[in-house]
Image (tube, grey):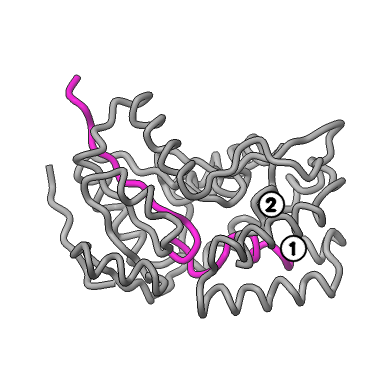
Amino acid sequence: MPPEAAAFFDLDKTVIATASVIAFSRPFYREGLLTRRILARGLWSQVMFLRFGAGAQALERMRQRLLRVTEGWEQERVRRVVTDTLVQVVAPIVYREALDLIAQHKEAGRRVYIVSAAPEEIVEPLSHYLGADGAIGTQAAVSAGRYTGQLLSYSYGPSKAEHIRQIAERDGIDLSDSWAYSDSATDLPMLEAVGHPVVVNPDRALRRIARMRDWPVMRFTELTPVKPAIPAPLRVAAAGAIGAGLLGAAALVAVRRRTAIPAE
């Protein structure tokens, strides 16, 4: 079989309009997992993240802080919260332009993957929800059914590109003929890993890089309610995916010229 092409999408501020972990902060607060003070800090972090983006140092500080917050949380309790609230949390914050691109790539015969530093327990069911073919997210460690505050795998920066290369080798994908979409300069390795990098709602650093390299820049602005691409299996997929590392990458909280996609 000849190599296939694929499209790799970052999640936060690329497919959805906010940080995915922050989007679930209210359900966690209602469940008693977060205090009012932590919730307020998280919402402020979201405002700053949406307005200015987040540098690597700020993301690392928040990642460590929020890993400490989630240490000791019960895996099953977290799984239930995400499973029960996934659709109501995610449906209103998806960019219509991202959905259109996902549909165009699939119609052209390309596989679609969500590659995010958000927890895989959020990324995997969300990718099912959007009709993507696969997902990569951060994995956190669990012991005796509780989060330990440690990470097994952090899907961020250069490791995103490494995950993409592993997917390409596993699934027979030609990266030189593939696409990648992201908003952040921290995803530069991911964008450089493919033949068709596209910048979406870029932060300042990535905007400068895109200008220097003449990469296409897209602006996603329109939110649209989303119906599940695969309605029936959604709960099962979410329940099976939500586990060991739900909030391992919570630090990411602290944290568009439109291009035509050629059909094959």
- Badge 2 vs badge 1, beta-carbon distance below 8 Å: yes
Circle 2 sits in a helix, a strand or a loop, which is it?
Answer: helix
User: With respect to residue 206, does 48 lie above or below?
Assistant: below
Q: Is residue 215 left or right of residue 23?
A: left
Residue beneath disc 2: 82
- The quarter of the picture where the C terminus appears is top left
**Quarter holding residue 31:** bottom right
**Quarter holding residue 208:** bottom left
Amino acid identity at mark 1:
Pro
Would you say residue 10 sits in the magenta stretch?
yes
Would you say residue 49 sits in the magenta stretch?
no
Q: Position of residue 93 (x, y in %)?
A: 51, 68
Amino acid identity at mark 2:
Val
Q: Is residue 88 visible?
A: no
Q: Earlier in the sequence, mark 2 or mark 1?
A: 1
Circle 1 sits in a helix, a strand or a loop, which is it?
Answer: helix
Q: Position of residue 19 (x, y in %)?
A: 57, 64
Q: Is residue 229 left or right of residue 258?
A: right
Instruction: Sort mark 1 into few (<14), some (14-19) or many (20+) by Cα contacts within 10 Å.
Output: some
Q: Position of residue 226 (x, y in %)?
A: 46, 62
Magenta range is 1-27
Residue beneath disc 1: 27
User: With respect to residue 15, does 71 lie above or below?
Assistant: above
Q: Position of residue 108 (x, y in %)?
A: 19, 44
Q: Residue at x 33, y 51 (%)?
A: 191
Q: Which is nearer the eye, 129 or 11?
A: 11
Farthest-out residue, top: 1
Q: Is residue 218 left or right of residue 202?
A: left
Circle number at residue 254 = none
Q: Is residue 20 visible?
A: yes
